[in-house]
Image (cartoon, helix red, strand yellow):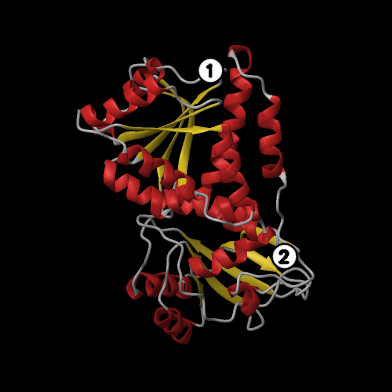
Amino acid sequence: MISIKAKEFEDIVFKILKKIYPQVDREKEGFDIIITDSSNKKTYAEVKFSSNYELGAHIIMGWADKLNTDSFFIVSKESTTVIITSCYVSDQVIISTFERYGIHIFDIRSLLDFSLIDKFLKNTLESFLFENVINFQIPIEIYNFNKKPLQPPKRKQPTLDVFNAHTLDNNYELKDSKEEHEFCKKLKLINPGRDFFRDYENLLTDIIKFLFETDIVNWKSQKRTESDLNIFDLIGRITSKSLFLSQLQNDFGSKFILFEFKNYSDPLPPNTIYTTERYLFKTGLRNIAYIISRQGPSNNAIVAARGALKESGKLILFLTDEDLCKMIELKAINEDFYSILEEKLDDFLMNLDRN
């Protein structure tokens, strides 16, 4: 019986392939996916998910051997068979599997290349992998083998070399939503105050998810604690993709990061920090929070945040609308917006005294 995670991974693979090929069918003729290209040639695909980042030869060969010996494995010479997996597979194992069984292995390097066809699906795939594969990381090593068995028409997708260079030919452009360019405009249209707090909260949720994408996963909005006494605006799990967040995670012992949104017309009062501090729980690996507001913190709020760090090791930092807009602008031009967060953290820690 296929697991829920394996089913979700197969769904993502299917959607990526559907973006590329004229005909993609599921669970026909005993295979997970059957792809038919424009010349009517079929590729038979088995989709394999594992929570391990890298698998050895015995697992991969076992998959191929089972596929090769199952009674339904009847494929014509004009067709191709592939195994698409969520794992990293070494080049030598890919070569050995093809030499022994004639089966192509498309590991996560290849699938990430194909996902470039659609920005949303690429982000969906990466989010799933960071959330469900242990110690997942974006592979630096490129997929060195010809993707010819699954290479779509050139009018829709570039060749292998172009794909590995992460660029596109002149006949196709990646879909790129312009919504991020509207975030700051929308932010300025929301008035401060209690009457508009929900509008502010909803927009900031979209902004935070846009900024951090796969760096933070498993988002939960308005998440209640077990006792129902505390409700977070937004919480997510830190992945290893961002160096800054990974260091923050290690330094402050937090698996999760909390975001609070305050649509106040005045600077934040200290009681806001005391409330957020109660949400943080070191044993629950929930030890870091960002409070985002219109005007930033008052001096007393900053003192309260420093006290929370000194007394209980809970890190509470602050961002404003202006900070978010600067981060959005940097991300839109593919620059590192984490420099803003690093500067905020350094300033907070360097001004911390022992008293």
Which amino acid does the dot numbered 2 rest on?
Tyr
Q: Nearer the viewer, mark 2 or mark 1?
A: 1
**Residue positioned 40% across, 82% down in the render:** 92
In this picture, is 151 found above or below 307?
A: below
Q: Which mark is residue 21?
A: 2
**Residue positioned 62% across, 79% down in the render:** 161
> Residue under circle 1?
266
The reply to whether residue 75 is visible in this rendering is: no
Q: Quadrant of residue 36?
A: bottom right
* Image position, residue 293 (x, y; %): 52, 26
* Of residues 183 and 237, the one drawn nearer to the viewer in this rendering: 183
**334 to the left or right of 157:** left
**Residue positioned 68% across, 72% down in the render:** 42
**153 to the left or right of 84:** right
The reply to whether residue 184 is visible in this rendering is: yes
Q: Quadrant of the C terminus?
A: top left
**Residue positioned 63% across, 62% down in the render:** 116
Q: CA distance from mark 2 to mark 1?
A: 55 Å
Single out the residue that lies furthest toward the bottom.
99
* Of residues 241 and 87, the one drawn nearer to the viewer in this rendering: 241
* Image position, residue 217 (x, y; %): 46, 44
* Image position, residue 219 (x, y; %): 48, 37
Kindly indicate whether the residue at mark 1 contacts the one at mark 2 (C-beta within 8 angstroms).
Answer: no
Number of marks present in the image shown: 2
Q: Quadrant of residue 41?
A: bottom right
* Label 2: how many Cα within 10 Å (few below 14, some 14–19, many 20+): some
